[in-house]
Image (cartoon, rainbow, N blue to C red):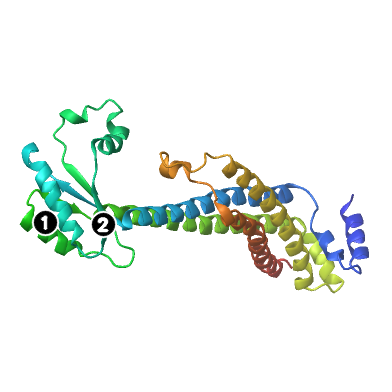
Amino acid sequence: MSGGGRIRRLLGGLSRPQGAARVVPPSGSTAHLTVLTAGAMAFLAVFALALSLASGRLADRWSEALARTATVRISAPEAQLEAQTRAVLAILDTTPGIETARALDAAEMRGALEPWFGPDLPIETLPLPQLVEIIESPERPFDAEGLRLRLAAEVPGAVLDDHTRWRRPLVEAAGRIRLLGLMALGLIGAAMAGLITLAAQAALAANGQVIRVLRLVGARDTFIARAFVRRFTSRGFVGALVGTACGMGAVAALPAADAAGGFLTGLGFAGLHWLWPLAIPPLAAIVAYIATRQAALRMLKGIR
């Protein structure tokens, strides 16, 4: 269709509620770019969200698993090991804040070392220390420093490890990964806004002649901008909807959480967390609306 014919068609449709939307080409490079950008960014946003939520679950799991446990390590000659173990258990039985304390047997020691040394480790021939597992009372914590001093005074070969030095770095690392996931979501949103802005500017520049004619017949800039905003917002929503669906399908195909696999097999959503990705398409539409409106009003000021 010639430029004059297209302008007449546009002018004829301005009286209808959706008439201004004819300013925006229904197809072409800008349409494909907007849909593709929104879909790709939504796909990446699903994985960034999954990473953030999985990191939060991992931090909570590590914190809960290690918060109430502690270990006493007894290093002594074999002839004295049993006596010192009994002495340690007696001390722990009279320590406020300790719910249970028990010495690990050879089978449990072998199970703890098996992931590193294999199932054929001759544990009976190794000079391993005796480990005593402590479970803290949920009502009140025990005084770790006081217990450490008492063990040092009465059983010099016993060392208390309350797992604090192990728990804190793990929880901090998981928390930082969660923060990185949230930062990635912000960067993805900013990148999508930038690309949609470029697409809107390209569409406005391509329709400069039409915009000048619309102004001649009395159309205001806000009326013209509304057409671009409506079209690009819908494109952003549709693209993000498709990208989110693909991303959720890809996350669902990841291996399920497994105790042996740890973090690498727990990168999916759990329970009600599957509802969080559904917020991505509306958020993408909001980003597209804001980016397109600002770009349209700015570009219209420069078109004379």
The residue closer to the viewer here, 287 or 115, is 115
- Three-letter code, disc 1: Leu
In the image, residue 181 sits, relative to residue 266, either above or below, namely: below
Q: On the image, which quarter does residue 120 sit in?
A: top left
The image quarter in which residue 175 lies: bottom left
Dividing the picture into quadrants, the one containing residue 222 is bottom right
Say which residue appears at 91% left-offset and 64% top-offset: 13
Tell me where residue 32 appears, x and y as whole percent.
72, 47
Question: Residue 199 appears at what percent x and percent y?
Answer: 67, 54
Q: CA distance from mark 2 to mark 1?
A: 18 Å
157 sits to left or right of 252: left
For disc 1, the marked residue is 151
Q: In the image, which disc is placed on residue 274? A: none
Nearer-N-terminus badge (2/1): 1
Residue 195 higher or lower than 227, as above or below = above
Residue in view at x 9 percent, y 48 percent: 157
Can residue 173 be seen from the camera position used here?
A: no
The amino acid type, in three-letter code, at marker 2 is Thr
Q: Which residue is mark 2?
A: 164
In the image, 116: left or right of 283? left
Q: Residue at x 49, y 46 (%)?
A: 267
In the rendered structure, the answer to whether residue 144 lies left or right of residue 231 reads: left
Q: Identify which residue is drawn at 15% across, 64% down.
A: 146
Q: Nearer the viewer, residue 110 or 271?
A: 110
Q: Are marks 2 and 1 in contact (CB under 8 Å)?
A: no
Judge whether residue 199 can be spotted in this image: yes
Residue 185 pos. (x, y %) = 53, 56
Q: Secondary structure at mark 2?
A: helix
Q: Nearer the viewer, mark 2 or mark 1?
A: 1
Q: Whole-percent x and y of residue 128?
A: 16, 37
Residues packed near mark 1 inside 10 Å, few (<14), some (14 to 19) or many (20 plus)? many
SS category of the residue bearing label 1: helix
